[in-house]
Image (cartoon, rainbow, N blue to C red):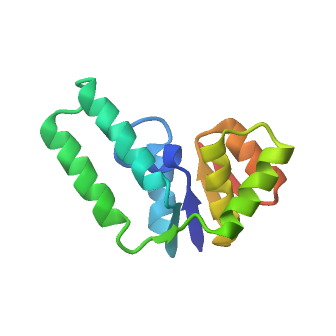
Amino acid sequence: MRVCFDSSAFAKPYIQEPGTPEVLDWCDSADELALSVIAIPELISAFCRLHREGRLDDGQYQGIKRDLLADIEDALICETTPEVVQHAVRALETHPLRGMDAIHIGATLACEADVFLSADIRQGQTAARLGIQVVGL
């Protein structure tokens, strides 16, 4: 089973918060993890913000970054192809979304994921309306 994650969902194994156990279960049960290429800089941006705010020390930040990069070595990273952009544009034209949220949905559709995990309610609702099986966190 190919499981695609948006950034808000894929952050949960690295930053303990509600939904972390569910995401870890999905990671364990997936045959393949999938992410939009934009998820990686979004996650690093979030981790850098936590580091700047003093919520992560240097060692924690480096450890989280190392773990993330190791975890995605075998993941399907969906590039922002014309197909992804077309799906994203259609989603934006018919639903109230932010641009990056639409890219995650477009990537999920383009990589033909079986399940999409998102901690963003509006994004999850939109993905479900577009025929994607969604797990909200």
The extreme top residue here reads 53
Residue 113: x %, y % from top left: 64, 69
Along the line of sight, which residue is nearer the eye, 66 or 96?
96
Displayed quadrant of residue 49: top left
Displayed quadrant of residue 130: bottom right
User: Along the horizontal axis of the image, is 110 left or right of 57?
Assistant: right
Q: Is residue 18 above or below residue 26?
A: above
Q: Quadrant of the C terminus?
A: top right
What is the tally of numbered marks visible in this picture?
0
The extreme left residue here reads 59
Identify the residue at horizontal 30%, vertical 37% (top origin): 48
Identify the residue at horizontal 77%, vertical 46% (top origin): 92
The extreme front residue here reads 82
Along the line of sight, which residue is nearer the eye, 37 or 22?
37
User: Along the horizontal axis of the image, is 16 left or right of 120?
Assistant: left
Q: Is residue 99 above or below residue 110?
A: above
Along the line of sight, which residue is nearer the eye, 72 or 28?
72
Identify the residue at horizontal 76%, vertical 44% (top origin): 125
Q: Is residue 46 above or below residue 133?
A: above
Answer whether residue 68 is visible to the viewer in this image.
Answer: yes
User: Along the horizontal axis of the image, is 63 left or right of 93?
Assistant: left
Residue 15: x %, y % from top left: 35, 40
Identify the residue at horizontal 51%, vertical 47% (top origin): 9
Q: Quadrant of the N terminus?
A: bottom right
Answer whether residue 128 is visible to the viewer in this image.
Answer: no
The extreme right residue here reads 94
User: Along the horizontal axis of the image, is 30 left or right of 70?
Assistant: right
Residue 90: x %, y % from top left: 81, 54
Residue 69: x %, y % from top left: 30, 61
